[in-house]
Image (spheres, rainbow, N blue to C red):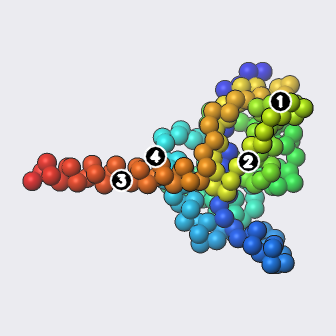
C-alpha cells in the first residue's frame, strides 16, 4: 500500500540521565532538566519558524519525552493532539509501532518523540528497508535533534526517504536567526512610523 506521510522524528531533550548513570545513580523515568526544558522551548520555536505542518504528536510514555511533547505542542498550539504510544519506549517493538502507524494513522504529518537508539533504528528501517548489509554509515539523532522522513509505504515493509536531519545546534541557529529577523522587522516598522 502506498502511503504519503511526513514523519518528523525528535529525540527528547536533556534529562541529565547520562551524568546520573555515570555517577551510579538509578534515574528510572528521568524528567527533563531545566536546561533540557529551555533547549526544547528553543527547538519548538524553530519548528514553528520552519512552518512544519504537524497535525499530531505521538510520544513515548517516559517523562522526558512527554514533557518534550507538551512544550512543542504548546508552541505549535496543538496541545490536544498529543498521543502516548507505549511502543516508543527505548525497548519498544518497532514492528508493532509500524503496524499501529499503518492501522491508526489518518494524519499526513506526525511528530514522533522518542529515544535513542530506537529512533535511529527506525530511520534505518525506513531508509534501508531493514537491509543493513550494505550500510555505509551511521545515523545518529542527538538529544533535541530532528529528522524528516517521507514515509512512502508501510506494507509489506516500511519504506521512506530521509529528507533532512537537523542537529540541535542548527535548530538553535534557525531560531536565533528568526528572532533577529522579527526584531529587525519591528525596528524597521518603528522607523517607518516616525
Image position of 150 with respect to 93: above or below: above
State the separation of the CA atoms marked 4 and 2: 24 Å
Q: Position of residue 107 (x, y in %)?
A: 64, 35
Local SS, label 3: helix
Q: Which residue is mark 2?
A: 140
Residue 70 position in % (x across, y down): 60, 59
Cα distance in 3D space between marks 4 and 3: 12 Å
Ranked by sequence position, the earlier of labels 4 and 2 is 4
Give the mark nearer the N terminus: 1 vs 4: 4
Q: Is residue 181 above or below residue 107?
A: below
Res 176 quadrant in image: bottom left
* Rendered location of residue 18, percent (x, y): 76, 68
With respect to residue 128, does 111 lie above or below? below
> Which of the labelled discs sits on residue 180, or is there none?
3
Kindly report the distance in space between the C-alpha atoms of the residues bearing marks 1 and 4. 32 Å
Query: Which residue in the structure is indicated by mark 4?
Result: 49
Query: Considering the numbered disc 4 on the image, is that residue within a helix, a strand or a loop?
Result: helix
Left or right of 177: which side holds 32?
right
Secondary structure type for disc 2 = loop
Q: Are marks 4 and 2 in contact (CB under 8 Å)?
A: no
Which of the marked residues, 1 or 3, is nearer the chain's N terminus? 1
Residue furthest out toward the top: 1
Amino acid at each position: 500500500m502506498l502511503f504519503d506521510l511526513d514523519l518528523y522524528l525528535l529525540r527528547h531533550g536533556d534529562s541529565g540521565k547520562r551524568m546520573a548513570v555515570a555517577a551510579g545513580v538509578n534515574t528510572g523515568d528521568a524528567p527533563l532538566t531545566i536546561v533540557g526544558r529551555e533547549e526544547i522551548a528553543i527547538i519548538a520555536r524553530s519548528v514553528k519558524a520552519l512552518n512544519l505542518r504537524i497535525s499530531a504528536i505521538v510520544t513515548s510514555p517516559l517523562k522526558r519525552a512527554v514533557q518534550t511533547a507538551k512544550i512543542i505542542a504548546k508552541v505549535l498550539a496543538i496541545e490536544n493532539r498529543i498521543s502516548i504510544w507505549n511502543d516508543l519506549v527505548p525497548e519498544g517493538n518497532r514492528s508493532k509501532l509500524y503496524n499501529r502507524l499503518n492501522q491508526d494513522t489518518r494524519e499526513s504529518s506526525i511528530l514522533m518523540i522518542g529515544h535513542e537508539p530506537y529512533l535511529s533504528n527506525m530511520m534505518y528501517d525506513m531508509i534501508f528497508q531493514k537491509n543493513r548489509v550494505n550500510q555505509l554509515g551511521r545515523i545518529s539523532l542527538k538529544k533535541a535533534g530532528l529528522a524528516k522522513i517521507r514515509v512512502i509505504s508501510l506494507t509489506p515493509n516500511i519504506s521512506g526517504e530521509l529528507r533532512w536531519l537537523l542537529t540541535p545546534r542548527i535548530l538553535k541557529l534557525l531560531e536565533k536567526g528568526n528572532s533577529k529577523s522579527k526584531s529587525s522587522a519591528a525596528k524597521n516598522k518603528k522607523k517607518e512610523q516616525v
